[in-house]
Image (cartoon, grey):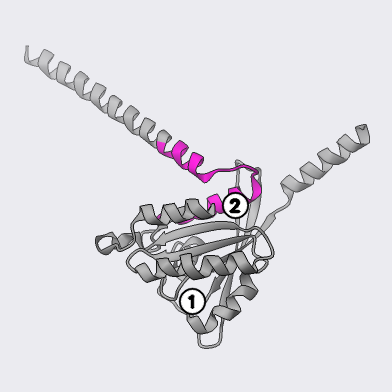
Amino acid sequence: DKIKNINNNLYSQIWNYMDKCLKVVFLGESGVGKTSIIKQFFSNDFSHETYGPISDQLIFKKTISFPDLGYSIKFDIWDTKGQEKYRSLAQIFYKDANAVTFVYDITDNSSFESIKNYWYEEVKKNSDRNPVLSVVANKTDLYPIQRVNDSDGKEFADKIGAIFQTTSPLLGTGISTLFDNIGKTYFIPGYDYRIEDRRIISEYKMKKERKEEREKEKNNKLFSLIKYLNL
């Protein structure tokens, strides 16, 4: 038993010091902003770049440290083309993926219907694994012309057991949270991104309330001082 415990502890230490690898494949129609999300994640730079005439996919690699996990995660992110003529090739890339991210454009209802009626069904039918799924409502900076409600995206994500995240590569919002939740969902048994989101919102509200209380107290003191000086 002692030897077994030593081996288990040694394995645990080795596991914690090793970088974990995660293959993430992005799927969705052409023009929904898959490449822009990925490039924003890697370089914090919004990009309108598209594929060249030869490349069928782009592969990006980035290692992110997760201090609360005690180790780093290596993301191998595969960016696929969305045009119909390339659809048959996409399953080659997501067949063995650890995580699959479905992206739609909030201003284009057809791009949302596509991930519901085509991309998700294809992954369910052809994946060799049980990948972490994410549904991403992209281009939130275009909210004045939004055609797909966030509630519809979240409802679909909940239905298929996926992470739901809104993003804007232009504003740089929601993207780091997306990858953070993908990594933690894959490596932490029972991790629920919704609980984490509620915790973050709760902490934000508490900090906001404390700040408002301090400002109120400061103003009251200032008002009392002014009143005293006037007397």
Instruction: Relative to 52, say whether 192 is above or below.
Output: above
At label 1, which amino acid type do we have?
A: Gly
**x, y (%) of residue 120?**
53, 65
- Specify whether residue 177 is in view: no
Q: If the image is split into quadrants, where does the N terminus sit?
A: top right
Q: Nearer the viewer, residue 160 or 180?
A: 160
Q: Residue at x 50, y 70 (%)?
A: 118
Q: Residue at x 57, y 77 (%)?
A: 57
Label 1 or label 2, whichever lies nearer to me, is: 1
Q: Is residue 65 magenta?
A: no
Q: Main secondary structure of the magenta part?
A: helix
At label 2, which amino acid type do we have?
A: Gly
Q: Is residue 175 magenta?
A: yes
Q: Nearer the viewer, residue 65 or 116?
A: 116
Circle 1 residues within 10 Å: few <14, some 14–19, many ≥20: many
Residue 209, quarter of the rendered image: top left
Instruction: Relative to 95, say whether 160 is above or below.
Output: above
Give the residue at mark 1. Answer: 82
Q: Secondary structure at mark 1?
A: loop
The residue stretch that appears in magenta: 173-201
Q: Secondary structure at mark 2?
A: helix
Query: How far, Cα to Cα, is label 1 from label 2?
Result: 24 Å
Q: Residue at x 68, y 66 (%)?
A: 96
Give the residue at mark 2. Answer: 183
Q: As drawn, is 141 to the left or to the right of 102?
A: left
**x, y (%) of residue 75?**
61, 60
